[in-house]
DNA sequence: CACTTGACCTGTCCGC
DNA sequence: TGCGGACAGGTCAAGT
């Protein structure tokens, strides 16, 4: 899925496109993707106007003037794509989208009163769009437990060090992926940040020196900010709110670069499995 | 509690 | 060409 930079790219795109739009109709084809009662939909979604688009960790929130919000998790393959202009068909020079919508991955369609539409697409059906009172969002278990935003001013290297201590017997990669330690890191930016800090993903947290944690903190902020600037990373499933791909993968140093040279030392990058996830490392730069 | 593994889904790729 | 298995940017419920 989209990690923090991808979700932030979607948020910023949507925030320019949908506030002020009034919802006229909604359709959905998979209950787990849209687990909301017909009564709530009728009373708090249909006829409501979008007031704001926010993000916390990897969660998107579309606030409505009904005091309800759509809380959205894209998980592995979710997309939020807005279609507002006349369609010419994917691939047509006048069409910016890379896909025709809706398609077989479309789970939820919101139709606005001006005829524009917002599609929630999700090939693997792990993601969801939940309608709930805006004021209840902070009470969701995930929101109560999730760690600090890594690009916030209060996220210092000491904060990272202290929050990781609870999991000092785990490997650093598993801990970076733990959303209760810090928010928003996933498989791509864990690998990229660890390469930047020259730390092997299987290193136990208890063995990390302060200098390494300080560098890791700096590298995580660097890759996340760079990725946001580049519009996120794209595989075949990720697109932004306008249906366009991000370009961070052009800048990736290790992620999905197995068998290619390390940009720092030229050694062939290896792929292994750490914390149950495909993991990319330079065996020299990130030696134990 | 901390930690690991499997489950949730569909689609694609790779080896036989 | 078909088939089986591994794998894909996440999280949660179980198990030890």
Image (cartoon, coloured by chain):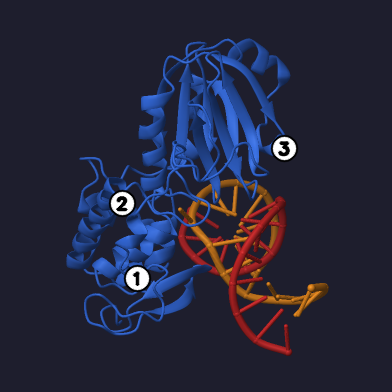
Chain colours: A blue, B red, C orange
Q: Nearer the viewer, residue A116 or A134?
A: A116
Number of other residues with Cα within 10 Å of mark 1, as a class: few under 14, some 14 to 19, many 20 or more: many
Mark 2–mark 3 distance (CA, rounded to whole Å): 32 Å
Q: Is residue A202 visible?
A: no
Q: Residue furthest front?
A: A93
Residue A149 sits in quarter: top left
Give x and y (percent) for residue A87: 53, 32
User: Where does the image place residue A260, in percent across and percent down from the top left?
Assistant: 36, 79
In this rendering, position of residue A208 left or right of residue C1: left
Inter-mark Cα distance, 1 to 2: 14 Å
Q: Residue at x 55, y 18 (%)?
A: A115
For the residue labelled by badge 1, is the local secondary structure a helix, a strand or a loop?
loop
Residue with the mark numbered 2? A227
Sequence-wise, the earlier of marks 2 and 3 is 3
For mark 1, what is the residue? A254
Q: Is A44 above or below relative to A107? A: above
Task: Give the residue drawn at x 21%, y 67%.
Answer: A212
- Residue A160 shows in this picture: yes
Q: Residue at x 55, y 39 (%)?
A: A89
- Quarter-wise, where is residue A187 in the image? bottom left
Mark 3, residue position: A30
Q: Helix or strand or loop: what does disc 3 sit on? A: loop
Marks 1, 3 in one chain: yes
Give the quarter of the figure containing the C terminus of chain A. Answer: bottom left
Q: Is residue A10 left or right of residue A264?
A: right
Q: Chain of mark 1?
A: A
Whether residue A193 is situated above or below residue A80 in the rendered picture? below
């Amino acid at each position: 899925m989209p990690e923090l930079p991808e979700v932030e790219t979607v948020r910023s795109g949507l925030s320019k496109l949908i506030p002020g739009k009034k919802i006229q109709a909604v359709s959905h084809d998979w209950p787990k993707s849209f687990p909301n009662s017909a009564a709530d939909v009728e009373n708090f979604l249909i006829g409501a106007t979008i007031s704001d688009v926010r993000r916390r960790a990897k969660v998107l929130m579309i606030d409505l003037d009904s005091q309800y919000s759509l809380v959205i998790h894209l998980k592995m393959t979710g997309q939020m794509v807005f279609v507002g202009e006349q369609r010419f068909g994917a691939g047509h020079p006048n069409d910016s989208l890379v896909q025709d919508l809706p398609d077989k991955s479309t789970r939820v369609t919101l139709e606005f009163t001006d005829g524009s539409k917002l599609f929630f697409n999700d090939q693997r059906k792990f993601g969801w769009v939940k309608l709930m009172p805006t004021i209840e969002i902070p009470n969701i278990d995930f929101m109560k437990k999730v760690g600090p935003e890594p690009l916030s001013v209060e996220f210092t290297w000491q904060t990272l060090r202290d929050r990781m201590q609870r999991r000092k017997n785990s490997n650093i990669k598993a801990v970076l992926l733990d959303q209760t330690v810090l928010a928003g890191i996933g498989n791509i930016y864990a690998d990229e940040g660890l390469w930047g800090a020259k730390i092997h993903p299987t290193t136990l947290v208890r063995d990390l020196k302060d200098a390494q944690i300080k560098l890791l903190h700096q590298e995580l902020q660097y890759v996340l900010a760079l990725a946001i600037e580049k519009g996120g990373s794209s595989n075949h499933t990720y697109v932004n709110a306008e249906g366009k791909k991000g370009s961070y993968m052009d800048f990736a140093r290790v992620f999905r670069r197995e068998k290619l040279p390390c940009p720092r030392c030229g050694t062939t990058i290896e792929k292994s499995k750490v914390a149950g996830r495909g993991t990319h490392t330079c065996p020299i730069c990130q030696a134990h």
